[in-house]
Amino acid sequence: MNISIGELAKRTQVKVPTVRYYEQIGLLASAPRTDGNQRRYGKAEVDRLNFIRHSRELGFEIEDIRELLAMTAEPQASCHQVDSIARNHLAEVTRRIESLQALQAELERMIAECGRGRICDCQIVEALADHGKCMGEHAH
Amino acid sequence: MNISIGELAKRTQVKVPTVRYYEQIGLLASAPRTDGNQRRYGKAEVDRLNFIRHSRELGFEIEDIRELLAMTAEPQASCHQVDSIARNHLAEVTRRIESLQALQAELERMIAECGRGRICDCQIVEALADHGKCMGEHAH
DNA sequence: TCTTGAACCTCTAGTGGCTAGAGCTTGTAG
DNA sequence: CTACAAGCTCTAGCCACTAGAGGTTCAAGA
């Protein structure tokens, strides 16, 4: 296997500019070039990029992915750190969900109170203008 | 009332650089200056900035807030557009919650399967490397 | 072999919403 | 007067891409 960046992009569903970006930030090794200066990739890079894309889809940050990839280079090492990274990320996702759910509740309340009349009577606008009308985590 | 930017920041809990940023992007009018070139604000600006901050806390985008503020300048107009902006935003928040919940489920599954052994046996790493092991909205 | 269009290359800047200095000026209290 | 806090403008950075611009290479077709 000795594929171009476009073919790599097609196989992994990662855009060409994004592949270049990942090389730039060191997530992918600098690819060997043809005489015409074009990058060429093998199966290992396809696998690595699939790992990266999948991790990104799951919301892992680039630095986390960098660490995870470094760990896969030490197959006999303990996976304690992998577990830790995943748990931290899960906790963050959970926090974000909770925060968004609080926002959702506030927005629902505001919209329910809207009489669909004029701006000067609008409960949405009044709620935005007056912080005290909110309750819950969003309010302080 | 004729307060400095620092006082405005204290009253509204919006940082000084953020106030300047909002002026730069036109969300706040350019403030009148002292002979020493310092900005000075009145009650109207405090109220406006509170509206902005509150809307940002609820996750409205700057452009949405710009529109909402423009509407408050027409008190007799219909609040149909306000309602529409809020509903669109609520729908987006709902989508984000659902997407995060799918991620959460995948992460929980991966972590539950982790045997806490070595990297080469790690179910988290294997799941990240093999897309087919995921299910749900995240998988394709 | 030549032509042409697609794909490849590097480089720069932008997205959204701030945030962080650097270096200078103003205001106020002691 | 002095010193320090707060004000000012300007630039660049954060995060993870993304979008051109302008030039080169590759491969298919005539």
Image (cartoon, coloured by chain):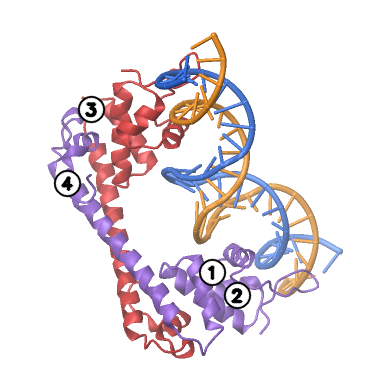
Chain colours: A red, B purple, C orange, D blue
| Residue A10 picture location, percent across and down | 33, 33
Disc 3 to disc 4, how far (Cα)? 28 Å
User: Residue A79's spot in the image, x, y percent?
Assistant: 21, 34
**Which residue is located at x 44 percent, y 23 percent?**
A30
Label at residue B135: 4
Residue A67 rendering spot, x and y as whole percentages: 34, 35
- Left or right side of B36 for B70: left
Q: Nearer the viewer, residue D16 or A140?
A: D16
Task: Look at the numbered disc 1 and give the secondary structure of its residue.
Answer: loop
Write the residue at 28% across / 40% down: A54
CB under 8 Å between callouts 2 and 1? yes
Q: Which residue is mark 3?
A: A77
Mark 4 → mark 1, Cα distance in angstroms: 42 Å
Residue at the image point whose x is 19% and y is 34% from the top = B126
Determine the secondary structure under disc 4: loop
Q: Note whether A38 is above or below A83 in the view shown.
A: above
User: What's the chain of the residue with tag 3?
Assistant: A
Q: Which residue is mark 1?
A: B14
Badge 1 sits on which subunit? B
Q: CA distance from mark 2 to mark 3?
A: 55 Å
* Residue B137 location (% of width, % of height): 22, 51
Question: Hey, which quadrant is residue B28 in on the image?
Answer: bottom right
- Give the number of the mark in front: 4 or 1: 4
Label 2, label 1: how far apart the Cα atoms are: 8 Å
Which amino acid type corresponds to the residue marked 2 in the rendered image? Leu
